[in-house]
């Protein structure tokens, strides 16, 4: 916001610009860099439109093997999802029960887990299209972009993406499929696991699921 | 004996519904508080969780040993397109019930849309086997009595796991009885029962892979299903509110005390 003003510099805002620069210097160059990018970065709707286009291009590319396809989609997801924020939201008040190492491990394992469990499902969305139908401002700066599946077995299904733009880039922090938020669903499940055994217990379960490839193996049919 | 009691209960519900409908026609529903007024949005009200979990274990067992096995057979008997067509057919047969609920919820435009859907799919869609209406932009509003009660401001009540039927709550349970009553009034109860049984088997077949995956992926399947059910019902009821409005109720989900660390 600061930079948007300084970009459209006129004589009238010259003094404000100096004040901005002073403030920027005080807050550190990092923030200015991030903020400066925000002005040029695509908005939430564009982020989703781009992501959808990229994912559909990968899915339609019949030259790719199933593994290559999965890897390509994972790469796109890693670009557009904020797994750190997702992890915090999923653990909520339990986040502070995790030590620094436990947090790092959770982040890594949860990311792998999501990649495993949703990677499999991706192969079923081949003939479908996705259209962005609108966006909605949420409290405290988040934006929800609404998409709808066109064609195929799940025609008409609504998939919402909630994005947060605090770091200068709009990143996805939740996916809501037909009203069911992924963050909320895992929060409820993890709460139960944590109530029964604490952070280590949850990490063991995550590791087991990822290692056994239970999710992938089950998809034998 | 049980049957006559059930029949009486159904008749009773129909009477209640007729009364409710009369109230709508008289324009007396304006007093209804807004939808989604459940007390705590974050934690699910589940006071009888220990019992619910026991029933869930029973349902899960029953599914693994009977329904899933039957679904695998059903899956092998007919091609996928048959299963999809059959689902379309039962969806289409719900058309009149959906329309009634559109009207009960004070949504005449949706009722018109669902009427259009029903007419298009019943004719061009060969009685509902195909779903050309969705392609034409007439989407299924999929309303039911449970949602109608929610729109009227009746609270959901505690979460319930019902033997054989799965996740529910008192409001949706009454709604379900009302749905069944309405259909039974048209088709008679045995026919409704047979149709429902086939429909359940067929829908379970379409979910074979999804449920297998979800079973493997879940950390606590009961908590996962409870959460999904409660979230989905809430969103279905809130649907008629302006979709452009921010979801205030979810504030607790996306921000918590530790959040300021992110800066």
Image (cartoon, rainbow, N blue to C red):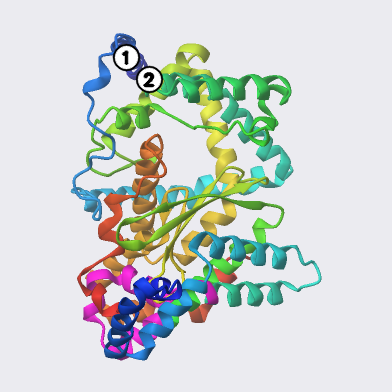
**Label 1 residue SS:** helix
Neighbour tally class for label 1: few under 14, some 14-19, many 20 plus, Cα within 10 Å: some
Neighbour tally class for label 2: few under 14, some 14-19, many 20 plus, Cα within 10 Å: many
Q: How many marks?
A: 2
Residue B180 percent coordinates (x, y): 43, 23
Which label belongs to residue A180?
A: none
- Main SS type for the magenta part? helix
Residue B110 percent coordinates (x, y): 49, 25
Tell me where residue B149 sits by quadrant: top left
Residue A152 percent coordinates (x, y): 67, 46
Q: Which residue is mark 2?
A: B104
Q: Is residue A197 visible?
A: no
**Label 2 residue SS:** helix
Tell me where residue A96 sits by quadrant: bottom left
Q: Are marks 2 and 1 in contact (CB under 8 Å)?
A: yes
Left or right side of A109 for A190: left
Closer to the N terminus: mark 2 or mark 1? Answer: 1
Task: Work out which quarter of the rendered image holds the N terminus of chain A and state it.
Answer: bottom left
Seen as rendered, the residue at the extreme right is A63
Q: Which residue is mark 1?
A: B24
Chain ID at mark 1:
B
C-alpha separation, residue under disc 2 versus residue under disc 1: 7 Å
Name which residue lies at 35% across and 59% down.
Answer: A184
Q: Which residues are magenta?
A: A79-107
Chain ID at mark 2:
B
């Amino acid at each position: 916001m600061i930079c948007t003003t300084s970009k459209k510099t006129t004589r009238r805002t010259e003094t404000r610009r100096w004040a901005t620069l002073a403030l920027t210097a005080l807050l550190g160059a990092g923030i200015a860099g991030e903020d400066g990018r925000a002005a040029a970065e695509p908005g939430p709707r564009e982020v989703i439109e781009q992501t959808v286009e990229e994912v559909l291009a990968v899915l339609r590319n019949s030259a790719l093997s199933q593994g290559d396809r999965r890897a390509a989609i994972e790469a796109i997801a890693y670009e557009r999802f904020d797994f750190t924020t997702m992890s915090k939201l999923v653990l909520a008040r339990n986040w502070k029960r995790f030590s620094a190492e436990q947090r790092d491990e959770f982040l890594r394992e949860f990311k792998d887990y999501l990649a495993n469990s949703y990677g499999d499902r991706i192969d079923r969305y081949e003939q479908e299209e996705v259209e962005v139908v609108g966006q909605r401002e949420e409290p405290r700066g988040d934006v929800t972009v609404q998409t709808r599946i066109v064609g195929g077995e799940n025609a008409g299904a609504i998939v919402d993406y909630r994005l947060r733009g605090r770091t200068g880039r709009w990143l996805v922090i939740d996916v809501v499929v037909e009203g069911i938020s992924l963050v909320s669903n895992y929060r409820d499940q993890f709460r139960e696991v944590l109530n029964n055994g604490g952070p280590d217990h949850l990490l063991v379960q995550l590791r087991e699921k990822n290692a056994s490839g239970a999710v992938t193996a089950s998809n034998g049919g | 004996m049980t049957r006559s009691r059930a029949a009486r209960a159904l008749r009773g519900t129909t009477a209640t519904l007729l009364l409710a409908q009369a109230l709508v026609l008289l324009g007396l529903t304006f007093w209804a508080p807004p939808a989604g007024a459940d007390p705590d949005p974050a934690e699910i009200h589940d006071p009888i969780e220990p019992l619910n979990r026991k029933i869930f274990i029973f349902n899960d067992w029953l599914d693994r040993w009977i329904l899933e096995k039957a679904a695998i057979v059903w899956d092998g008997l007919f091609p996928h397109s048959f299963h999809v067509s059959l689902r379309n057919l039962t969806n289409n047969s719900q058309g009149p019930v959906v329309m009634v609920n559109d009207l009960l919820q004070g949504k005449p435009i949706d009722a018109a849309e669902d009427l259009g859907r029903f007419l298009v799919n019943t004719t061009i869609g060969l009685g509902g086997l195909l779903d050309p209406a969705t392609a034409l932009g007439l989407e299924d509003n999929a309303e039911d009595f449970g949602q109608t009660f929610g729109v009227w401001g009746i609270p959901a009540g505690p979460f319930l796991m019902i033997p054989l039927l799965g996740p529910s709550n008192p409001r949706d349970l009454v709604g379900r009885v009302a749905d069944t009553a309405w259909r039974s009034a048209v088709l008679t109860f045995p026919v409704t029962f047979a149709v429902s049984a086939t429909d359940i088997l067929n829908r379970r077949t379409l979910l074979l892979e999804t449920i297998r995956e979800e079973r493997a992926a879940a950390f606590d399947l009961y908590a996962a299903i409870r959460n999904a059910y409660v979230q989905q019902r809430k969103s279905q009821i809130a649907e008629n509110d302006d979709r452009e409005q921010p979801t205030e109720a979810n504030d607790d989900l996306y921000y918590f005390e530790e959040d300021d660390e992110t800066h």
